[in-house]
Amino acid sequence: METVKIKLGNREIPLRFTMEEFAQIEEAVGNLSTIDELLLKGKNRIRNTQKALRIMGNAGLAAAGEKPDLTDKGVMEMMQPRRLVEYQTAAISAINDGMYVEANEDEERDLVLEDIERKKETGN
């Protein structure tokens, strides 16, 4: 699986989602079972996206051997309004990548993505 990356300012930031980031994001943003509400629809979607990017970005930087120096204020200053959907997509993609579960040896399933797709199809 390829690492999800985002461009913030003049930096390309790898996003990492493990149990540690899972816990941090849930503590900062809310339960990820409602990720579409938290990052896409809710009134706090912009700040929630920014917090998720900071948490996963710092983890990705650290894993790449770089200094995990992203701050909430810094990330918000580097985010561009016209790229909000790109940021939301990157955050959700990184979370989805971390949520892959194997249904069997030959098939991988992404339960979060399946739930989002199911909701789109039913109009929920």
Image (cartoon, rainbow, N blue to C red):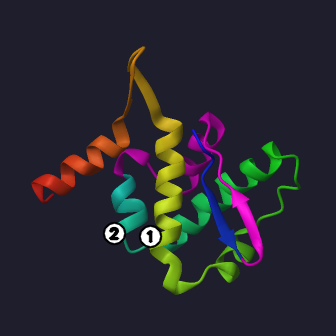
Q: Mark 1 falls on what kind of element?
A: helix
**Can you say whether 108 is above or below 34 in the image?**
above
- Is the Cβ of the residue at disc 1 closer than 8 Å to that at disc 2? yes
Residue 8 on image: x %, y %: 69, 73
Q: Residue at coordinates 12% horizontally, 60% vertically from top-left?
A: 123
Q: What's the residue type where badge 2 is placed? A: Lys
124 or 47: nearer the viewer: 124
Residue tagged by mark 2? 41
Q: What separation in Å lies between label 1 and label 2 (alpha carbons)?
A: 6 Å
Vertical placement of residue 50 versus 55, above or below: below
User: Residue 48: image x %, image y %?
Assistant: 51, 65
Q: Mark 1 Cα within 10 Å, few/some/many (few <14, many 20+)?
A: some
Work out whether residue 105 or residue 111 is closer to the camera in this orientation and state it: 105
Is label 2 in a helix, a strand or a loop? Answer: helix
Q: Position of residue 104 (x, y in %)?
A: 37, 15
Quarter of the view holding residue 22: top right
Q: Which residues are magenta?
A: 9-34
Q: Residues within 10 Å of mark 2 (few under 14, many from 20)?
A: few
Judging by the rendered image, the residue that carries numbered circle 1 is: 45
